[in-house]
Image (cartoon, rainbow, N blue to C red):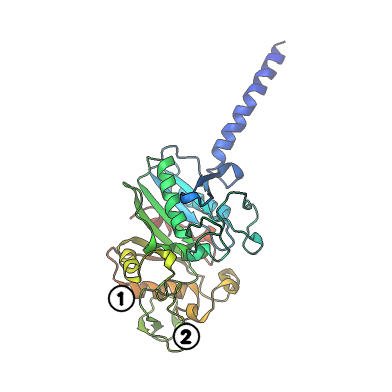
Amino acid sequence: MMRLVLWALLLMLAPLRVLAAEDGACAERAGSACLRSFELPEQAGRMSFYASDSAPAPQSVLVVMHGHPRDANRSFEAGLQAVRGAGRLADTLVVAPLYQVADANRCHTRGVPLAQAGDALWTCAGWLAGEPSLGPQPIGAFAALDALLVELHRQWPSVRSVTLAGFSAGAQMLQHSIGFAADPPAGIAVRYVIADPGSWLYFDPVRPLPEGGWAACAAGCRFTFQVPQACPGYDHWKYGVQALPGYLGRSAEQARARYGATQVDYLEGALDSSRAKGAFYPILDTSCAAMAQGPFRLQRGLAYTAYEQTLLKPQLARRMIVVPGCGHDVTCVLPSEAARAVLFGR
């Protein structure tokens, strides 16, 4: 009889143990239980995001923006690794938004859910350029990111700071969005970490030219800046601020001023600088406009920070950290010890 009673108690407690395991699972990895969704403004549809569960009243949020294959699950887990390594799981929420697309065949990562009815949809290249979503009630990709910050503030009112970090195409998207972002919710400080983007948004028509040539430019390069002579359209959006699309909602001058006033830091993998396998050169943008910024991601990043210091002159000091031993790999760059200085405050 006693055995039957104990067995009944175990059966009753089993669902509670499973629930507790599921509650903690989103501090370890991405899974369907970690996905949340919210309605975008103006009936534009629904947007989903992964969220961790280890900080019930978080003070800060690390938002990790996925790359071109929309690897929000992998980006989320890289963010979790970074927060865990910094000892910040108790006070930091990790979030990874997911831009759904109409045709996922060209930009899908295993384990990431496909779009459902009612989701806001973009094209594989549209979301990273800030383009409006598809359908009768479109919303710009940058505006959707603004709406996500509002939603995070609504769900977690204890939050006081948000760090938006992006890698590869996600970094490109974030770097381009800064000048066109809406003001964050009151009481929230926002900062950006841009890691290994394939190309950059310049606010002047000049481009870098390293002394001694690109072959010798891996670190500590010295640059002059000149206007390219044989690259039509090199300064058009999304490489420059000529021919800005109307949906961005700001002029080039306004975007430049906002970019210069925002807290931004940069990361580059030290090995993201060649045609070697770990640098994923085949997916690098090699258009004329992109190559005018440099031959590889590391060199493009070093050139851009030199451009900032020389011409853009931001209001706040910015750091470029080259992460040793990392190629083009979000799971190497973001969780690295070197990255903590910029991911978790100054």
The amino acid type, in three-letter code, at marker 2 is Cys
Work out which quarter of the rendered image holds the C terminus and state it.
Answer: bottom left
**Is 151 drawn above or below residue 109 in the view shown?**
above
- Comparing labels 1 and 2, the label whose residue is closer to the camera: 2
Q: CA distance from mark 1 to mark 2?
A: 21 Å
The amino acid type, in three-letter code, at marker 1 is Leu
Give the image quarter of residue 72. Answer: bottom right
Q: Which residue is mark 1?
A: 311
- Marks 1,2: beta carbons within 8 A: no
- Whether residue 91 is visible, yes or no, is no
- Indicate the secondary structure of the residue bearing disc 2: loop
Q: Which residue is mark 2?
A: 231
- Indicate the secondary structure of the residue bearing disc 1: helix
- How far across and how far down the image is residue 256, in percent? 33, 69
Nearer to the camera, 203 or 71: 203
- How far across and how far down the image is residue 266, in percent? 40, 64
- The mark total stands at 2
